[in-house]
């Protein structure tokens, strides 16, 4: 099956995406277009449908309705092609604790069939970028939560993907590590990569994202650049915008 | 399916087995400890605790050259303490009172059968057929397992002088397999069952491994790489097949050191190891089924016993101590055929082409592949929602 011709500069398109779990509609007719070489922030309260949207993009979930495309590939019908161009760091710190940081990253390089000659260099490169080269030979079980998260990001990036999906990438990181990861994400964008990230850190969205989509109850309720959104809502920062749009009520049990 | 993906995943599994203490213990250390414990407990050490079976012989034909030779050969084997009875009723009484472990009734035509065979060893039309009856002590598991085949050995090779195990004779007795008649310890009769016993714990390891990978999200994460579910299962198969072979070699080294010396040549040993290794596929399949229905790695440990216990009781050396009905039930379990094949090949010295061994190998191979396929299907279907395994 041929990849659909790219329309303009859209790297990821989501058109009327709906995902239902029985009676629960987690995503409700979501439509987005994420441009190439853009950092797109998908924000929303807990349970608003962010992770479900990402799982539909990766092909892990089959949408109930609508369609998604990653560089023109349908993740359901052209799963292999779509997965080859994507790097994914999921919400869970999905790493093998009994492997070292280097072994985790190398494993994912091998699963993407990165040539052996280039793999060693690439593994070292991404580990250095996330600040883990010195701890690369330690087993992940000995890492802190923030270090595990950084390994997870390195695993997503070892194949040098064109489209990068980062589900809450900096949870549990100290400020220095978070800043290093931000710098790396910006660098990737400048290299032409398309990045979709979800985050609960509004300063992260403000700092990093070129475009932000705020979703609630599975629906897109606002879309724009951080600057435009702050101007539109006469808000001091993105947190203010977020609270105005989604309210103060806590969505999940504390 | 891509070989580099399979190899990468297999390497990952090997690292887990050798780095996680619980896995290392169950798959590598436990079989060694178990073998040594059984060896020392059941008379393998030093060779001083060999068993001699008390057996009674009644010659319904009266004293004849052949019946006398049979009794003499039984005694000479060193495995039997032979008592002679003139009356069947007296012998039956001795058996029922526990004075004997087995009773052999040589039929009235025994002498004619032996003579007819010796005169025309290759012409069955000239033979006088007769049946040697055996009565066994039901309370002794070992007698049921060992004595019939040892009697066949004595009858065929010593009394009749048959050249091979596959050569027909006019004397019918249940098993055609050869037996290396010698002093036999309990451990030697149990040893083949230790291999399946050690291997079935792989069910628990596979179930825990897949369940924890699913719960921590790494399984789902691998599924968003260009890796297929076939690569993942094949990676597990490769890693656990090699682990199974390694485990079997370890157990073999232990039982050999403890005095179990298989009556098999290179081919018999190779086929034995092949059967044990193939059996790992069955354990992977049961492990996948367990993982599919388990909500956590802890639950998987408990649920794995649903598959583990029947095989343990009915398919290993433990089964020989159970009732005939239970032993028959064991025929529905792959482990039974592993133990049966190893007993035939290594204890009885049966040929790799003997019908019994070929049947066992086929049963293990077919059931293992089917169970593995069922495991993959059930895991994909039941766990799909939790793992998002496509």
Image (cartoon, helix red, strand yellow):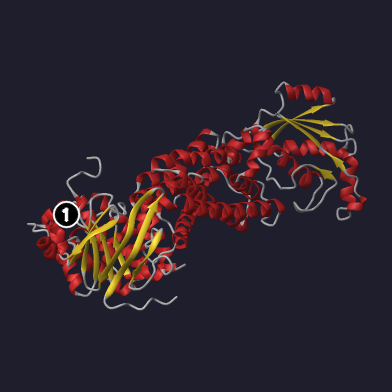
The spot of residue A100 in percent (x, y) is 28, 57
Residue B277 in view, yes or no: no
Between residues B204 and B127, which one lies in front from this camera angle? Answer: B204
| Residue B328, placed above or below residue B167 | above
Image quadrant where residue A64 sits: bottom left
Where on the picture, by quarter, is residue B13?
Answer: bottom left
Check the picture and name the quadrant holding the C terminus of chain B.
Answer: bottom left
**Picture layout, residue A71 above or below residue B242:** below
Query: Picture coordinates of residue A194 (x, y %)?
Result: 24, 70
Q: Is residue B41 left or right of residue A57?
A: right
Disc 1 is attached to a residue of which chain? Answer: A
> Farthest left residue?
A236
Residue at 74% in and 25% down:
B95
Q: Nearer the viewer, residue A200 or B260?
A: A200
- Crowding around mark 1 (Cα neighbors within 10 Å: few <14, some 14 to 19, many 20+) is many
Q: Note whether residue A108 is visible.
A: yes
- The extreme right residue here reads B126
**Image coordinates for residue A169, horizontal then vertical, percent:** 22, 58
Task: Find residue A134 and report its horizontal and vertical position in percent.
Answer: 18, 60
Residue occupying the point 88% across, 36% down: B64
The residue sitting at 50% across, 54% down in the picture is B376
SS at circle 1:
helix
Q: Residue at x 55, y 45 (%)?
A: B196
- Horizontal side of A72 relative to B246 (left or right) equals left
Is B304 or A22 nearer to us in this picture?
A22
> Disc 1 designates what residue?
A242
Q: Residue A109: name its quadrant.
A: bottom left
Depicted B374 relative to depicted B54: above or below: below
A143, A85: nearer the viewer = A85
In the image, is A39 to the left or to the right of B221? left
């Amino acid at each position: 099956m041929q990849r659909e011709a790219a329309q303009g500069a859209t790297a990821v398109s989501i058109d009327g995406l709906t995902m239902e779990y029985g009676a629960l509609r987690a995503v409700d007719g979501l439509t987005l277009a994420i441009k190439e070489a853009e950092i797109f922030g998908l924000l929303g309260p807990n349970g608003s449908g962010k992770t479900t949207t990402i799982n539909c993009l990766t092909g892990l979930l089959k949408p109930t309705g609508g369609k998604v495309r990653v560089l023109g590939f349908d993740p359901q019908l052209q799963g292999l092609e779509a997965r080859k161009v994507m790097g994914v760091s999921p919400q869970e710190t999905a790493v093998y604790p009994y492997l070292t940081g280097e072994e985790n990253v190398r494993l994912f390089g091998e699963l993407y069939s990165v040539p052996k000659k280039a793999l060693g260099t690439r593994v070292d490169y991404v580990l250095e970028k996330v600040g883990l080269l010195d701890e690369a030979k330690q087993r992940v079980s000995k890492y802190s939560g923030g270090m595990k998260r950084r390994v997870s990001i390195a695993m997503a990036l070892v194949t040098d993907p064109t489209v990068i999906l980062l589900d809450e990438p900096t949870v549990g990181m100290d400020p220095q590590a978070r800043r290093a990861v931000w710098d790396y994400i910006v660098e990737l964008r400048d290299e032409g990569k398309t990045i979709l990230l979800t985050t609960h850190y509004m300063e992260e969205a403000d700092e990093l994202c070129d475009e932000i989509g705020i979703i609630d109850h599975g629906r897109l309720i606002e879309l724009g650049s951080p600057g435009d959104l702050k101007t539109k809502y006469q808000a001091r920062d993105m947190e203010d915008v977020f609270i105005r749009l989604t309210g103060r009520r806590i969505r999940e049990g504390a | 399916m891509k070989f580099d993906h399979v190899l990468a995943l297999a390497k990952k599994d090997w690292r887990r087995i050798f780095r996680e203490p619980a896995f290392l213990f169950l798959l590598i250390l436990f079989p060694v400890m178990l073998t040594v414990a059984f060896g020392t407990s059941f008379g393998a050490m030093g060779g001083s605790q060999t068993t001699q079976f008390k057996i009674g012989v009644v010659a319904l034909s009266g004293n004849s050259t052949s019946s006398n030779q049979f009794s003499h050969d039984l005694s000479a084997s060193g495995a039997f303490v032979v008592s002679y009875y003139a009356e069947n009723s007296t012998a039956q009484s001795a058996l029922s009172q526990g004075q004997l472990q087995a009773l052999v009734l040589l039929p009235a035509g025994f002498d004619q059968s032996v003579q007819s065979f010796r005169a025309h060893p290759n012409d069955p039309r000239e033979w006088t057929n007769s049946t040697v009856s055996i009565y066994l002590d039901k309370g002794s598991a070992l007698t049921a397992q060992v004595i019939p085949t040892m009697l066949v050995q004595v009858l065929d090779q010593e009394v009749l002088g048959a050249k091979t195990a596959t050569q027909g004779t006019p004397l019918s007795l249940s098993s055609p397999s050869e037996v290396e008649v010698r002093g036999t310890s309990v451990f030697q009769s149990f040893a083949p069952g230790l291999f399946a016993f050690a291997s079935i714990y792989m069910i628990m390891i596979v179930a825990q491994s897949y369940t924890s990978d699913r719960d921590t999200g790494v399984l789902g994460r691998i599924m968003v790489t260009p890796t297929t579910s076939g690569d993942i299962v094949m990676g597990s198969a490769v890693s656990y097949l090699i682990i199974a072979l390694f485990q079997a070699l370890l157990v073999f080294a232990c039982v050999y050191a403890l005095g179990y010396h298989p009556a098999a040549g290179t081919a018999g040993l190779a086929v034995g190891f092949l059967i044990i290794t193939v059996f790992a596929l069955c354990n992977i399949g049961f492990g996948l089924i367990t993982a599919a229905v388990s909500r956590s790695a802890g639950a998987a440990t408990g649920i794995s016993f649903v598959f583990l216990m029947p095989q343990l009781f009915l398919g290993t050396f433990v089964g020989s101590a159970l009732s005939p009905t239970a032993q028959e039930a064991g025929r529905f379990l792959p482990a039974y055929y592993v133990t049966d094949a190893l007993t035939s090949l290594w204890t009885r010295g049966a040929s790799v082409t003997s019908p019994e061994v070929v049947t066992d190998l086929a049963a293990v191979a077919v059931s293992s592949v089917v169970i593995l396929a069922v495991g993959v299907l059930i895991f994909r279907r039941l766990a799909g929602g939790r793992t998002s395994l496509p």
